[in-house]
Amino acid sequence: MNALLILIPVSLVLLGIAVWAFFWAVNRGQFDDLDTPPLRILEDDPGAPAASRGGRDEGAGDDGGAR
């Protein structure tokens, strides 16, 4: 029973911090654009080398061109 006297105020303080953090993030614009970031990963970066895009250089390697 004595533990509840400590745990209830601590949980209320943590709840208050979570609510404050949520409203802080909303005011900072963290939730303004929810559609573009998931689509951005699908775009190719034209300035990146082929190795970083996941492709292979056609002339690279000494496997004799066999695939």
Image (cartoon, grey):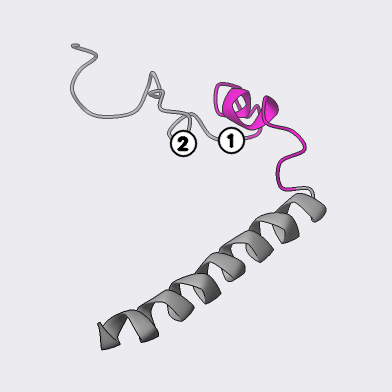
SS majority, magenta: loop
Residue 23 placed where, x, y %?
A: 73, 56
Identify the disc placed on residue 32.
none
Amino acid type shown at disc 1: Ala
Amino acid type shown at disc 2: Ser
Decide whether residue 37 is among the magenta residues.
yes
Which residue position holds label 1? 48
Residue reaching furthest front? 1
Q: Secondary structure at mark 1?
A: loop
Which residue position holds label 2? 52
Tell me where residue 48 sits by quadrant. Answer: top right
Decide whether residue 43 is among the magenta residues.
yes
> Which residue is more in the foreground, 16 or 3?
3
Q: CA distance from mark 2 to mark 1?
A: 6 Å
Q: Which residues are magenta?
A: 30-47
Q: Residues within 10 Å of mark 1 (few under 14, many from 20)?
A: few
Q: Residue at x 45, y 79 (%)?
A: 10
In the rendered image of this protein, does residue 25 appear above or below residue 65?
A: below
In the rendered image of this protein, does residue 67 appear above or below residue 50?
A: above
Q: Residue at x 38, y 23 (%)?
A: 56
Q: Is residue 22 left or right of residue 28?
A: left
The N terminus appears in which quarter of the rendering?
Answer: bottom left
Q: Secondary structure at mark 2?
A: loop
In the rendered image of this protein, does residue 54 appear above or below residue 31?
A: above
Please report contact status of discs 2 and 1: CB closer than 8 Å, yes or no.
yes
Number of numbered discs visible in the structure rendering:
2
In the rendered image of this protein, does residue 10 appear above or below residue 44?
A: below
Q: Residue at x 79, y 48 (%)?
A: 29
> Which residue is more in the foreground, 5 or 30?
5
